[in-house]
Each structure stands twice: as C-alpha cells, then as structure tokens.
Image (cartoon, helix red, strand yellow):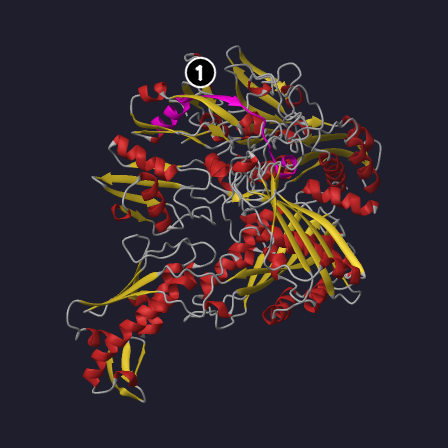
Amino acid sequence: MNRFELVRAASAAQAKELFAAKSGAVYKAGGVDVLDHLKEHLVEPPRLVDLKTIPGLDQIAVEGDGSLRIGALATLARVAAHEGVRKSHPALARACGEAASPQIRNVATLGGNVLQRPRCWYYRLESYKCIKKGGDTCYAIAGENRYHVIFGGGPSFPPHPSNAAVPLVAYGASFVLDGPKGPRTVPAAEFFVLPDKDPTRENVLEPGELLVEVKLPAAKGWKSAYYEVRERQAFDWPLVSAAIAIKAEGGVVKDARVVLGQVAPVPWRSQAAEKALVGKAVGAASAEAAGKAAVEGAQPMTDNGYKVDLVTTLVRRTVATLA
Amino acid sequence: MIGASVPAAEILAVDTSKAEALPGVKAVWVTDSRIVRFAGQDVAAVAATSPDIARDAARLVEVRYKERPFAGELREAMKKDAPGVFFLDRMPVPRDLPKTGNIAGPRVNRNQRGDVDKGFAEAEVVHEGSYYCPVHTHAPLETHGVIASWEGDQLTIYASTQALFAVREGVAEALGVDRKNVRVLCEHMGGGFGSKLGPSATGSAFSVVACRLSKLAGAPVKLMLDRQQEHLCTGNAPSALMTVKVGAKKDGTITALHYKSWGSAGVAGGAGTAGPAGALHGKNPNLKIEEYDVFTNAGPSAPLRAPGHPQGAFGLESAIDELAEKLGIDPLELRRKNEASPVRLSQYDAGSKAIAWERRNKKAGDITTGSWTVGGKGLAPSRVRGLGMANGNWYVFASENTNAQVRVHRDGSVEVLTGCQDIGTGYRTAMAIVAAEELGIDPADVTVRLGDTQFPEGPGSGGSTTLNSVAPAVRLAASQARVKVHELAAAQLGASASDLDAARGKISVRGDATKAVTFKQAAARMSGESIDCLVKRPKQYETYRNDLAGTQFAEVEVDTGTGVVRVVKMVSVNDCGIVVNPLTTQSQVIGAMIQDASWALFENRLLDRNVGTMVNPNLESYKVLTPSDMFEAQSILTPVANLGNNTSTAGIGEPPIVPTLAAVANAVFNATGARIRELPLTPDRVLQALSEARRA
C-alpha cells in the first residue's frame, strides 16, 4: 500500500477540516473496508482521517417514542447485541449479527457497513480496470457473474454489499449526514443510487460528507424479520437476504415493506411483493404470493438464475415467520 | 516476486529501471523465459530493505506483453478450436503418447484386465455417467517462502517445505553449487498438503530466486509469496472430467467397468485420476481405463493429498451409487458383493454401524422412508437428510533413501536425529514413541532433533511416506543402541544381555525384577561420550502388501428451498497398520475429512472465461470451510499388522481424503433424489439438480 498519514479527529467538525485540508483524504471508521482498498491500491489516499476517536458517535439510544438513534460508529456487534434494538427492530439486530465473523463485527461499524463498497471480484482486484473503477467495461456481463445482480443492473452489475442497509430501508430509516455544506438528513430509500447515472458510486454521499447517525422510526405495530442465505455458515456474504416488515390489524396486513439484499446494486425494495401482502391475512398463501411477486421483473445474468429461486423461497419463509 | 498478469503471451520487455532506482532496493532478478503460459508465472523479483519497499518496487517493474489467445478451463481447452498451450512436440508428456490439440493420451493403466466389451454384453444393467471436479488450490495458511542467507560460499535456507533435501538438491543444482555447501532447515511448517515437495513450487522458482537475490544484495533475503501468488503458481489439484460406464448382473455382480478421464494440471502433465478405478471393486473381471492430460493456460498442479484420487473416487463412486439405484440394491450391499479386500469388508461393518446406515432413505429423496429425528423445524421446512458412502484406496510407499540416528549420551539422555520435517502430522512425537518403546524408556525422555539437512537424510513428506520410511530406521537404530546399553547393563547385573528386559527406564533380568539397573546407570558405564547408531533403512518386505483400504460414510442435511448443503456427520474407516500415536493419527483422519468436505461444498478456483485470470485469488471468495460449517467427524481405525516394515506402520495423511467427495454427493442424492455430477455442491448446482429431478 502507499504511504499515508493517519490523523485522528476529536470531533465531526474537526474531521471535516482534516479531510478538507488534504486533497484525496479518506475517512476511516472501523477500517475494515478501507484497509482492503489500500492493500489492493483501489484507493491511494495521502491521509486517513480516523473517525474512531470522535467521542459519542457510537451511542445507541432508544427514544421515548420508541424510535432509535444509532451513532454511525456503533460496532455491528453492539447493534446486534443491543436489547432495545433486538426488541423493536429485530431485523436490524439480526442483519448486523450475521455479518462477517465475530472478530470483524467487533471492529466494523454500522456506518462503515452501510458505506462499504461492493464485493464484486472484478472491482476488488486492481488488475481488472472495470467500470466501477472508472474503466469502460463491466467484466461480469460476459464473465463470472454467479454472485451478481438480478435487478437494477447496468452499466455495472455488482450487488450492494451491506447487510444492515437492507433492514434500514425496510424500517424507513434516515441517515444524518454532515458535510462541508452542513448537516442534512436523507431517507435510506433515497440514499442508495443505481449505477445508471454514475457506476462509480453507490450512494449520494458527497465528498467530505460524513454519515454520523442512523435514525429509525418507532416500530410500534410493526413486526419484522431478516433472513439471509449463505454458502458458508459464517464469514460469507449472503447470496440473497430479505428484510420484511409488516403492519397488520385484525390479522390483515395494512402496510408492508419488502426489501431484498444482494440482488441489486442497491437494497432492493419490492413493491410488487408488498402489494401481494397488503389486504391479505399473513399466512402461507400470502407468503407464497409475496415470494412469487418479489421476483417480478428479475433479469438474471448467465450464471445467477438461482438467485431468482432463492428470492422466492426467502421472501416466502420470512413472511411465514411473521404470521 | 512479480508474476505474469496475463495467461498467454510473449514477454517483449521487462523494465526494472524504476524499481532499481527506488531507495532501499538492493537487488533485482528478471526471468530468462520469454513465453508466458499462465497468469502468475515468474517474471521478476526485487529485494529491498523492507517488505513495504519491496512491494512498492515490484509495482514499478514494467512488463510489456504481446498477448496470445489462451485456453482457460478444462472443457474449453478440450474443444477442437481451442488455442494450443504447447506445440505438440513440446508437451511435457511421454513422447509416445498420442496428442491432439491440448489433449495427450490415453495412458495405459497397469490394472486393466479382461475384456470390457464381453463384460458389458454379459451385463443386465448398465449405467453411464459423466462427472466433473473443478480445480482446488492447496491454500495452506502459511504461504510458500524462504529465507536465504550466504556466508562466503555457505548457503543457509530456512524454508517452508515438506522436503528439506529436495530444496537442498534443487537449489544446489540450479545455482551450480555443491550440496555440501547448502544447508536447509524447517522444523515445522504451516501447511503444505503436497505443494511444498519441490525446491520451490511447481509454478515458481522463488527459492532459487531468493538465493540469487541474497547473493546480489549481500544480505539475507526473506521471500514469502502473497496469498494471490499462493493460489496462482504454487500448485493445485487438477480439474477432472470423468466418464464412467459400469455394467452388472441384476444381482449386483459387476461385469465391466470402463473409466475415462480428462484431467487438467494446467501447464503440467500428470492429471490422472484412475487410482480408485484401478483398485476398487476388485472382483470385477473386466476393466478398461483411459486417462488423458489436457493442457490449459493455468498454473501447474502439484500433488495435493492423494493426487487425483478424490476426483477419481468422486467419478467412480458416484457411478457405483447410480448403478445401485438402477439395480434397486443398497449401495453398501452392492459394494460388499464386489469387494475383494477382506479389510474393507470388515470396515463396512464398523462404518455402517457408526453412521447407523439403516436410517438412510430407502427411496432417495423421500425422508419418510428413512429414520430421522430431525427436520421440519425452524425457518427451513424443506430440510431433508440423507446418508451416503464411498470407498477410497491408497498405497504403502516408503523411501529407502532414509537414515536415522539414535544417540545415547553418557548421562543416559537420548536423542533421535532425523533430517525429516514435521509437516503438522505429529512426526516428532511419533519418532520419540518408536525410539522409547525400543529402548524401554519414556517418550518424554527422548529428544527428537529434526528439520535440518545436517541430520541424517530422510524423505520428503509426500505420498504418506514419512512415518513408514523413518520409523523403521529409528526402530532399527534404537534397537542397536539398546543392544549396546544392555551389554553395559549385563556386565553390571552379571547376566547375559539377551536375558534382559527393558521398560519404564529400567533394565532387569527376565524373570527376576529385583535384579535391575536404571537405563541411566547402564549408560554411565559407556566408554566415550555417547553411543551413536546410524542406520540406513533396510529394504524390508515391501512387496508383501501395498494397498490400504478405506471407506467413508456421510450424513448430510439439504435445504431444498435454498440448495444449501450441510454435512452433519462423517465416519471415516481406515487401515494404516499399527498406530503409533492414536491422537495424531485421528487428527490426520479428521483433518482429511474437513479438507475434502470443504472441496465438496465450497472450493472452486475460478478463472475469468474472457481474461483467463483467477477472479477469486484470496480466502474471501475462494471459500474454505469455516468452524461454523463443521460436522461431527468420527475416525475408526482398523489396524492390520504386517505392512512390510519392522514397525508395521503406514502413513495416514492421504487415504481418508479419497472417498469424501463421493460420500457427500451420494448422501445429497439419498436426501434429495437429485444427482449432482459437478462439484462443488453450491446452492446454484443443488437447486438446478433439484429442479431437474422434479421434472424427471
């Protein structure tokens, strides 16, 4: 890796200053994804601005109205183990708890998980000058695409890697950002962007902008669950994941959120599956219908058709657990 | 090291000027070769005062290639219009083999017998199937590497190796120096699995390069390959495409087997897989074997724990399972009926009892016909279980080029000196046990000095040979030392040396335990400082028996909705002669099951079909089994004496890895009714096979 200086920020404001003072600087939270990028020369920053030294950004708070505020520096392990999160937003706790390995969950942060770059093998190897790295080709199209997307692809096709982002979109979370132009709040559903406009980015974060906090509305009246399918039982990215939240009255679904992971360049909300649930009783029939609806419009590549079957099964099973 | 970034090319120029100009760079090496045949092939190397500087310098080496079309994976390379990896007359295979395109063969197999046409004519049921294994890499945690250091003309090499003397001889020859001036050390090694048997690696000359760099730099050089290089140029297990045709009478009597295999060892030959086909189901009178090597623009293979055998057993034993299904006969019964080995017949009893074979689904894919206490709960209502089995074979190889020395000091302390390396099998402990038993002392009182070419020469640790090569020499040397010590004791006790017994550090007159001296008291009487017994392993009765029997049983759970397969339990039954150390022996067997289960479920070296370079040269997407994927692993040993040497020992590192791929795949069939003929058993393939089975 290239040489860089590590500077430690004492506050978000100072972090922004340290970032702005050095062209090409990169923020570092847990450091898991940044280190991978440095080692493979995917980024070569002259300066890393360490955010871990900022006090207070790792707090997890349950507000009086049942809403949650989670500092972006809270580790995945802490989010997964937090009683309040487990109780009110179990899909998020589970998604954080299933990620990677215990060792990584103890250092990786919620913010870093949400902002990590795709795991596409072409992107991750320096030798492939792919479109995500500013080249002109997505090697996955005609190449090895068994782990790539079945929705929303083009011109690049890597799945969004974040486990946690999937339930965050399902819960209608919003991200508190703080950048050179000051703070702003962006709904999670609008934060992630498809590659059609700019394949080198996965979200609307501006240069120098920080993700400082994740806000989750109260889940009162909602039941939710998150499941994923992996090849290995640990230390593996999911093939497909699903976060589903349902609001039911008298056994009938009034509102639903179905969000899929690892199938699109963003956490993929399936409104067809939601429609299949609303107005129906939660049970085997609606689970089946939602599973089928969730794959409407899927466009598998040469080697990832199995993901269509996985989505159907996973949505059906996840809905069934909410009955 | 800097490896080629493309799979097939002519090297036009290598410019190292920028690298050499980097402060801290002390030496640079560039290959003489101009033809690149695989991505990762040695191109250049730099040595610098720190690993960081060396890595930076390596990135400054500029290589210009004229790229050529490449032949990627096995089945692509077999096509008529595939680009040729070699000119036909340059293929690294025997001259007399037929050659077309990238294919050389068939090789004649010495186990062929009878007339398969006649055998198939006699058959009442015939099964023919095609099976495929991808390339696996060795993926040891410790990558290949050396430290090379010169003092004058004396070269010392600390190597991560399975074969100290191969490093010494290979490096001495490459550098044109005397062997006497080269010393190689490696006491313990962080994993090799067969890839560390040569001077460097099958696809790299890094050891020689490190020695040259060290000479140029005038300083010791440490050269460890990185993880990516480890996948590309240090060897792998060949991919294999196998077609198996097998015929039988309705009662299960096999009448003919025709086994064909096309294996690819990348740019190397030797991708045969017919070992199991030649050895198993020995009652079958008609056997034809045809093996072909297919060349691809990929790193050369290296021996990987029973080379070619797991692949071959996957093809053969899957086909036998399919035959059993067609015949409507229990696959265990079918194997019993055609079994020629009395050892394996007894292993069937032990293994089937341990796995509770009677639980299996009588009808594949229908768990109501089996006996299961689990399933149907939790998130996966479509969880099913099944049992499968498969056989394996291995051999008793031993190296006569083996010496060992036992030294008893005047104070009674004992050393065993052996040039062999302990590759993680517990070899050091085993040698202490053998020497101690012979001398009648406690193993803890024997110090085993190993891993140094200055000690008596021993074999490379490949082919499961180390124990049964060295243990007989150690026993013989210890026996000679014992005679000398007992002569000293006999004088003290006023008895004849031949009337003495030795146990737990005491030497006593047979029949009268009161007349005794300690081992130390006897040793104290020696003239001189030590009794030294150096022996060369005598040729013993090697030809008496050369086959090792093994069989394996697997229980799997399959989620039919997601295609995720988990191994629940595996039982491995093996013959390795007299067991020296049960703990480390069982550990080898369990380790083999784990590694092979990892191949069955996950591992797959994947080359991009358009670019020809590996897309998963890491341990993230080249997936190796994790502790969470672990299963209950049971080892049953069926010791059979008389393995052709004075300790009746045989190696166990390889035999238990042979049957696993097929045992797991056969268990998946029993669980689901879906036959998967291509590995690994990942959800995409399992779902595909399930959907085909439903349509059928």
Say left or right for B305 vs B436.
Answer: right
Q: Residue B95: x and y, percent?
A: 54, 44
The reply to whether residue A250 is in sight is no
Q: Chain of mark 1?
A: A
The reply to whether residue B219 is in sight is yes
- Residue that label 1 marks: A19
Q: Residue A107: x and y, percent?
A: 48, 35
Image quadrant for the N terminus of chain A?
A: top left
Say left or right for A152 vs A99.
Answer: right
Viewer-nearest residue: B135 or A69: B135
Q: Residue furthest top?
A: A181
Q: Quadrant of residue B126?
A: bottom right
Viewer-nearest residue: A57 or A95: A95
Q: Does the magenta portion include A300?
A: no
Under circle 1, the secondary element is helix
Q: Which residues are magenta?
A: B52-77
Position of residue B31 relative to residue A203, above or below, is below
